[in-house]
Image (cartoon, rainbow, N blue to C red):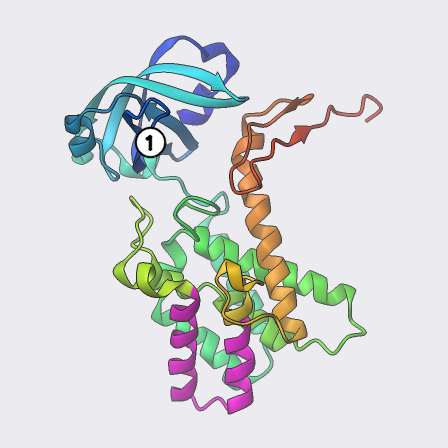
Amino acid sequence: MIKEFINDENVNKEATVRGLIKRCDISIASNNQKYLAITLTDKTGKLDCRKWQATQEDIDNVLAGKMVDLTGTLIKYKNSYQFKVTSYNFLNLNDVQIDDYIDSSRTSLSHMESELKTLIEKIHNKKIKELVETLIIKHKDKYFTYPAAMSVHHSYRGGLLYHSISVCKLSLLMASNYDYLPINKDYLIAGSLLHDIGKTVELSGYEATQYTIQGNLLGHISLGFNIVMEEGKKLNLNEEQLSVLGHIILSHHGKLEYGSPVLCSTIESIIVHYSDEVDSKMEMLVQPFSVATPGNETGKIGPLDKKAFYYPLKDEEE
């Protein structure tokens, strides 16, 4: 399995690794030659792979969604593990247990479903509660299985549900620390659980995730806003309820340059924004720290300003 394979003992040794190609991008090296940047996954983790000097045959055949045995060498590049591919062999999906090769949430679906139900029960306003329940039921298959992103964070089966619940729990924790402020927890819970509902339309699914046409052209923020407004009007939520909930969705990226068409203008929106920011960044650290060792740095993490993070040694007094 990938997680067991990624360690210093296997560095510079030829090996064959089996997995599902989650993503494959064509890039140009410094020598102007094309190469393939491949993300290989199984249920234990993911492996960053490179097929250098890619031929047209490689480009035509090495595609997201295929099961493959990659043969090559594990190397350490800028303190990160990378697999240098020399050859590959495709497998028939019918000959493997596909669930063993799909990266999934670290928390079981049944547990997340129970957590979700508990959070929704905390909503006191009947109309707002009905809106959340209706939308989640309507989009349940996708809301429960889709990733929260293509690659940056929670990019695995169940990632959207895990992220939404996590943002909601963080938001409630933050609200409890500032209980002297007039925070409306109904809006906070609903906004947290629905802030990324647009990703059920923006993304194609958890296998070989791609952006849909609507995702590319409209983005999950506007898609989510429209989903909530349309259903909210059907359920007769009033103008203020729709505006406050819609504002949370529209502003949850926090800045105009990050895709939010409006800036946070309610207490609830700023709490959801920062909860979303924290949860996303913490998830970006999971994989790098899973292969790092105490006393060393992780590899540079692209979405986190290309910084490496130090893993402190355990206190001997503990």
191 in magenta: no
Q: Is residue 310 visible?
A: yes
Task: Determine the residue positioned at 56% across, 80% down.
Answer: 244
Q: In this figure, which residue is indicated by the disc labeled 1?
A: 38
Q: Is residue 120 visible?
A: no
240 in magenta: yes
Split into 4 quadrants, where in the image is the N terminus? top left
Q: Position of residue 201 (x, y in %)?
A: 33, 63
Badge 1, how many Cα within 10 Å: few under 14, some, many 20+? many
Q: Is residue 255 above or below residue 53?
A: below
Q: Position of residue 118 (x, y in %)?
A: 56, 66
Q: Is residue 31 left or right of residue 125?
A: left
Picture mark count: 1
Task: Determine the residue positioned at 57% across, 41% down.
Answer: 304
Task: Determine the residue positioned at 81% across, 21% down.
Answer: 316
Split into 4 quadrants, where in the image is the C terminus? top right
Q: Position of residue 174 (x, y in %)?
A: 71, 62
Q: Position of residue 120 (x, y in %)?
A: 54, 71
Q: Is residue 246 left or right of residue 14?
A: right
Mark 1: secondary structure: strand
Type of amino acid under label 1: Ile
Q: Is residue 234 above or below residue 301?
A: below
Q: Is residue 242 above or below residue 106?
A: below
Start-end of magenta stretch: 221-248
Q: Give residue 235's quadrant in the image.
A: bottom left
Q: Is residue 115 left or right of residue 26?
A: right
Q: Main secondary structure of the magenta part?
A: helix
- Which residue is the extreme one toward the right? 317
Q: Is residue 266 above or below residue 89?
A: below
Q: Is residue 306 left or right of residue 98?
A: right
| Viewer-nearest residue: 9 or 94 | 9
